[in-house]
Image: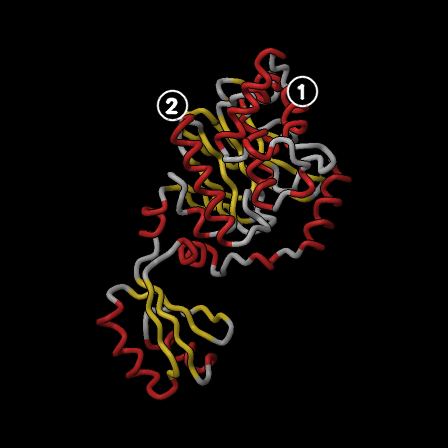
Amino acid sequence: MADAIIDVQNLTKKFGSFTAVEGISFAVKEGEIFGFLGPNGAGKTTTIKMICTILRQTSGKVVVNDFDTLHRQNDVRRSVGLIFQEPSLDNNLTVRENLYFHSRLYHIPGREINAKIDAALHLVGMEDRKKDLVRILSGGMKRRVEIARGILHAPKILFLDEPTIGLDPQTRKHMWEYVLQLKARERMTMFVTTHYMEEAEYCDRIAVIDQGTIIALDTPANLKKLVKGDLVTLKVRDSERASKVLTDQTEYRPLAENGELLLYIKNSRARIPVLFRLLGDDILELDVKKTSLDDVFIFLTGRKIREEESSTHERMKYRARMMRKI
């Protein structure tokens, strides 16, 4: 892609016999919000770490801002800002002290530091809290400080790895307002990983990743077109029997989910009477809704993305296992 600011070709990462990312290729356009959508453990964070030179790839090639990640690591690191999934601020320092430390790491000239700190905090609405200790801030405020720190050295690309994880829905909404304002003001390329469907809707394009492989890549609107029909949810008396009837007598292949059956039906209004004819009084409730990105993932993988797919304890064990293999 001619206007790509990130170009990934056949990227693979193995930890011993375990393949975390397998032969993925994609390009990110300059100035876009590019999303990685997938469940916990799909390979999202591992991919970001390879792009940002924190992890060395097993094979494949990555070029960031025209710099090869294997041979121009320092240039790549100057080109990117990274908001980690886990909190990474020093709680015993003030907001300003955290940003000052970061500015020294990136060799920002001393005469420019104060102005850059003030400008970054202004962009995220935290300029009046710069003297506060980080430990007294709310989770949402800490996230805003982390974004300010990530943009302090004026990177070409800002990586946000699950930027709103652990935040309440209202704070998540405000967080995205700041991200979108930042993109509009600074014309910065954003690379976002998430398993929240509503957040993926903010992206210009989305790569759907599962089990280390990209299974779809397009705009949110075009991805929804993959699902040919509305989502019909049936609550029935006997889901096993109803599923067999529908499988045997229609073209639908229902997905069982918590005692309900999910079907994707084109022209659903005209087809719903067929369901009642086949199942009759077995139907207790019926719901129809337009296609969402959640439905796209179900359509592509046969299951939902669930936050609880990987508990905190399981994620900690996974990370520890991977770190031992690096």
Which scheme is used to colour this image of the protein?
secondary structure
Q: Amino acid at mark 2?
A: Asp
Q: Residue at x 38, y 79 (%)?
A: 285
Camera-side residue of 199 and 58: 199
Q: Position of residue 56 (x, y in %)?
A: 65, 29
Query: Badge 1: few (under 14), some or many (20 or more) residues near its Cα, within 10 Å?
Result: few
Residue 281 image position (x, y, % from top left)? 35, 88
Determine the secondary structure under disc 1. Answer: helix
Instruction: Work out whether 291 lies above or below 318.
Output: below
Residue 238: tell me if it is visible: yes
Q: Which residue corresponds to mark 1? A: 105
Q: Residues within 10 Å of mark 2 (few under 14, many from 20)?
A: few
Quick one: 326 or 200, which is closer to the camera?
A: 200
Above or below 74: residue 136: below
Mark toward the viewer: 1 or 2: 1
| Relative to 135, residue 317 above or below | below
> Is residue 57 left or right of 176 when viewed as pictured?
right
Q: CA distance from mark 1 to mark 2?
A: 30 Å
Residue projecting furthest to the left: 270
Q: Position of residue 117 (x, y in %)?
A: 57, 24
| Residue positioned 46% across, 48% down in the render | 173
Picture quarter with the C terminus: top right
Q: Secondary structure at mark 2?
A: loop
Task: Give me the residue at 42% from left, 45% from top.
Answer: 216
Q: Which residue is mark 2?
A: 3
Decide if residue 22 is in sight here.
no
